[in-house]
Image: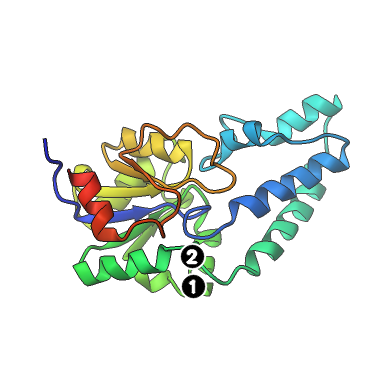
Amino acid sequence: MPQPPVRALIFDFDGLILDTEVPIYEAWRENYAAHGHDLPLELYVGCVGSDFHRFDPKLHLESLTGGPIDWDQWDEARERRALAIVNALMDPMDGVADRLGEAAALGIPCAVASSSPRSWVEPHLERIGLRQRFVLTRCLDDVSRPKPSPELFLAAAAGLGVDPGEALVFEDSLNGLIAAQAAGMRCVSVPNRVTAGLDLSGATLKIPSLDALDLSAILAAVTA
C-alpha cells in the first residue's frame, strides 16, 4: 500500500550533517588511553545519538580503574580536543547540501532534530553555511528526554505543521531510528564510520551516504 506523501524532512545533526561523531569518539578514546584502557566502538555506539542512559563512558571507565575520576579536568580537555577538530571541518557530509537544495526546489521544508544542545548545533550550522536552509531546529534544550524518545521528532513535526506520518527522518544512529519509529515517522538510515556496524535494518530505507541517491529517488523509495 502506498505511503502518504512526504511534506517535510527532519535531519539529525551529529554524524549526519557534520562528521562530529569520529572526533568525539576519538577524544573519549584518548581519555581511556590516558587511564590505561581502550574504549571499544561496539560499546561506545550505545550513547551515539542520545545521552549516557544506554551506555555511560564515565561510569564504564571508573569501573575499569576501580575508583572515581576527576571528570571536571578530563571533560574540559576532551571537549576542547573534539571542538578543535570539529571546528576545522568546513564542509557538511557528502550529499547534505545537494539534498537540501533539492528540498528547497520542491518546496519541502526542512528541520534539524538533535540530541545535542542548541549551543552546539546552531553555531556549527552557521559556520558551515547551512543554518538558513532549515526552517527550525529542535535540540536537547527543547525537550525533557533525548532520543530514543520520540519527543524531538514530534516537536520538529509540530513546528513544521505536519503530521508525523508526513515527515521523513534522516538518521545515522540506532537511537535516532528508534526515536523516528516511536514518533510514527519513516526513516532513512545513513550510517557513518562510527555507526556503520549497527543493525539499522528497521529503517524504511538505508543508504551509504546522502550522496548515494538524489531526493526524488529517496522520496520514490519511501512512498512506494
What is the number of the mark on residue 150?
none
Residue 205 left/right relative to 30: left
Residue labelled with disc 1: 126
> Residue at coordinates 44% horizontally, 48% vertically from top-left?
190
In this rendering, does residue 150 appear at all? no
Disc 2 crowd, CA 10 A, few/some/many (<14, 14-19, 20+): some
In this rendering, does residue 50 appear at all? yes
Secondary structure category for the residue under label 2: helix
> Residue at coordinates 52% horizontally, 52% vertically from top-left?
15
> Residue at coordinates 40% horizontally, 47% vertically from top-left?
207
The image quarter containing residue 7 is bottom left
Secondary structure category for the residue under label 1: helix
Give amino acid for label 2. Answer: Glu
Instruction: Out of 218 and 154, give the one closest to the viewer.
Output: 218
Residue labelled with disc 2: 122
Disc 1 crowd, CA 10 A, few/some/many (<14, 14-19, 20+): few
The image quarter containing residue 52 is top right
Residue 65 left/right relative to 52: right
Dot 1 and dot 2 residues touching (CB under 8 Å): yes
User: How many marks can you see?
Assistant: 2
Image quadrant where one finds the C terminus: top left
Compared with 113, 119 (above or below) is below
> Residue at coordinates 76% horizontally, 54% vertically from top-left?
76
Q: Measure how far apart labels 1 and 2 are at the Cα level.
A: 6 Å
Compared with 199, 33 (above or below) is below
Q: x and y percent of residue 111 in the render?
A: 34, 59
Q: x and y percent of residue 53 in the render?
A: 56, 31
